[in-house]
Image (spheres, rainbow, N blue to C red):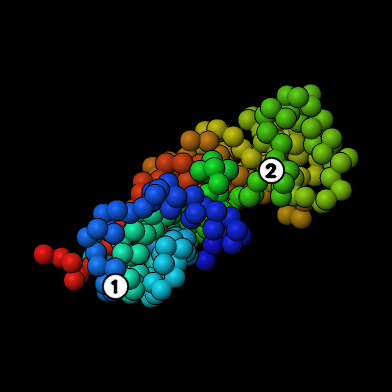
Amino acid sequence: MTDAPLDVLDVLVGLALAEDIGPGDFTSEWTVPVDATGEASIVAKEGVVVAGIEPAMRVFAAVDDRIEGEVVAPDGTLVGGGETILRLHGPLRGILTAERTALNFLGRLSGIAGLTFAFVQKVKGTSARVVDTRKTTPGFRQLEKAAVRAGGGENHRLGLHDMIMIKDNHIAAAGGVVEAIDRVRDRNDLSLRVEVEVRTLSELAEALTRSVDRVLLDNMDVATLRAAVERVHAESAESRPELEASGNVRLDTVREIAETGVDLISVGALTHSASVADLSLRVPDLER
């Protein structure tokens, strides 16, 4: 299930259908009898982690509320090629009109879930958790973050409003790491969690003179990450911040990063570089 508010999801579905249907799906209207009903299945053509069932179902309902769906593989399910994800029954015109838009949601979100699953498997057995970033498709953030969760990952902050994240440009504008943290501390009457980005061990030492919830270790090599973990673990467990590694993390590097002892690894690629899962909708009665 997605956490996207119903109105947001309805808007996205409405925009997607308007873009695809325009003044009408003339092909379906002119080839499929108006009273024709039947069965259809959405099938994985390759191994995939399912995500996006709710948006897909919302698409079919928006086109024709007489279309009924049976969820065979809920979000988070790992299915193999040829396996069914969703069964549909109802007016065939509506099913065919909704087909591509529903598959676009499912394919995009399942691709994110699958890539997240691959990263999570790579760090299995370590204490590191894989988290996403704000590098999401505009308007689709909550859907894409739900897909990350379906793949076994965790969400970073949702937006600019639910966590303080002091990045390099904030530090430059404030006049330094300590100055930026102090400015936040003086204004944080919302008690938001505070994270600060550091690029060097000296900046880390500055950050540790103040109380923060998390430190982002930006684009550090593995040796520097290990040194940072060792430095922070010298602090008492009660006051020690979480450590997040970030910066050009790939499937072939994430395990080594996880083994440094960091708590989180943020991966922008989960949402900005995932391939679309290969899915298809099949209507058996129309196959020749």
* Residue named by callout 2: 160
Of 109 and 30, the residue lying toward us:
30
Q: How many marks?
A: 2
Q: Position of residue 202 (x, y in %)?
A: 70, 29
Give the residue drawn at x 11%, y 64%.
288
| Residue 286 seen in the figure | yes
Q: Give the amino acid at mark 1.
A: Asp
Q: Please tell me whether residue 176 is drawn above or below residue 253 in the rendered image.
A: above
Point out residue 143 in the picture as x, y percentages from the top left corner: 52, 55
Label 2 environment density (alpha carbons within 10 Å; few <14, some 14–19, many ≥20): few
Q: Which residue is mark 1?
A: 35
Q: Is residue 131 left or right of residue 84?
A: right
Secondary structure at numbered mark 2: loop
Nearer to us in this view, 1 or 36: 36
Furthest residue toward left = 288
Q: Can residue 49 be seen in this snapshot?
A: no
Q: Taking 10 as reference, is 69 left or right?
A: left
Residue at image point 28% right, 62% down: 281
User: Nearer the observer, disc 1 or disc 2?
Assistant: 1
The image shows residue 281, relative to residue 194, as above or below, that is below
User: For residue 238, which quarter of the picture?
Assistant: bottom right
Q: Write the residue at 38% across / 42% down.
A: 252
Disc 1 crowd rating (10 Å Cα; few below 14, some 14-19, many 20+) is few
Q: Position of residue 38 (x, y in %)?
A: 27, 74
Mark 1–mark 2 Cα distance, whole angstroms, equals: 50 Å
Q: Residue 133's spot in the image, x, y percent? A: 56, 44
In the foreground, 260 or 153: 153
Q: Name the residue type under label 2.
A: Leu
Element type where label 1 sits in the image: loop
Residue 265 marker: none
Q: For the residues labelled 1 and 2, say whether their Cβ atoms are less than 8 Å apart.
A: no
